Image (cartoon, rainbow, N blue to C red):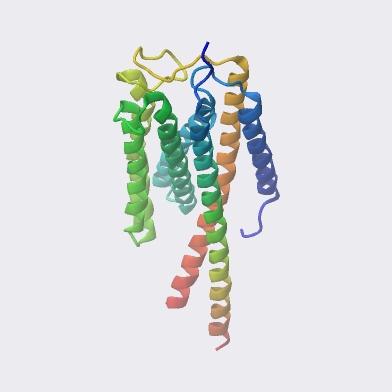
Amino acid sequence: MNAKPKLLTVMDVIAGVMFVTAVALVFFYAPLERVMGLVQKVFYFHVASAWIGMLAFAVAAFYGVLYLVKKDARYDRVELAAVEIGIVFAFITIVTGSIWARPIWNAWWTWDPRLTTATVMELVYFAYLMLRSGIEEPERRARFGAVYAIIGFLSVPLTFFSIRLFRTIHPVVIGSNDPGAEGAFDMTPKMTQTFMFSLLTFTVGFVTLLWHRVRLGALSDKVEQLKLKLQS
Amino acid sequence: MEGPANTLSYFIAGYGVIFGVLAFYIGSLIVRWRNLKQDETMLAELEKKEQAE
């Protein structure tokens, strides 16, 4: 278990190369937006981070269901790993969104439906970690965690559809914008290419990080078992 | 005609946050892995000693 699989090393290299390429595309290939200027380039990684946050929480819910059905600790490890990674990327999304908002909306923060639901989603998953840390018995922790990951996932579609269901100033990337949206722009082919490559890069990066985090969880469980064995 | 707004500092701040948070998270994975490996080695040695006694 401890020896790093060769495929994971290959994925590390691919993810690293893709990330550097995505950064180069954003910095040097994607054109400058004619109104917002350079800050618009935050868009590429802001949306890619949001995508990974939501994907990670969906993976967590899926593995939560699998755990409840099969009662296999491996599924619990994947679920926890996905939530942790989801929290990191959702945090990046919220902070970069706030930075982008400052020059465009003239405010760091506004209680807009998208910003509010995204923050609630992040807090829901912080609470997941707190819940887990409060339960010592591993099986009970995994069971509660699985149920929470499934119910907590309700916050994800709510966040995704918030800009399509409610009046908002947050622009919509796919679909038509609310007339009150501020910061919307038409994507040129070069912008679209950079955006799609960023999405792909972050997806490959997510799979790689997830694998690393699952291995860390397996090692952590092994150490916990060794401790219990020595104590008994 | 006016050019694009000067938002360089926000661009730098945005990517600073992205690179910083990702580096911190990857660093935390590395540190946690090393610490667990040390614990594993130490516990395995203790187990061997107990078995020898």
The answer to whether residue B17 is left or right of residue A1 is left
The answer to whether residue A25 is left or right of residue A66 is right
User: Is residue A185 placed above or below A147 in the rendered structure?
Assistant: above
What residue lies at 33% left-to-right and 44% top-to-bottom? A148
Depth check: give the residue in front, A60 or B3: B3
User: Seen from this angle, which residue lies furthest front?
Assistant: B1
User: Is residue B7 placed above or below A120 in the rendered structure?
Assistant: above
What residue lies at 34% left-to-right and 15% top-to-bottom? A180
Q: Where residue A88 sits in the image (x, y, percent)? A: 46, 44
What residue lies at 65% left-to-right and 25% top-to-bottom? A29
Q: How many marks?
A: 0
Depth check: give the residue in front, A112 or A210: A112
Depth check: give the residue in front, A102 or B15: A102
- Name the quadrant of the N terminus of chain A: bottom right
User: Is residue A3 placed above or below A111 in the rendered structure?
Assistant: below
The quadrant where residue A105 appears: top left
Q: Where residue A5 sits in the image (x, y, percent)? A: 67, 52
The answer to whether one can see residue A62 in this image is no
Q: Where residue B45 sits in the image (x, y, percent)? A: 58, 78
The quadrant where residue A107 appears: top left
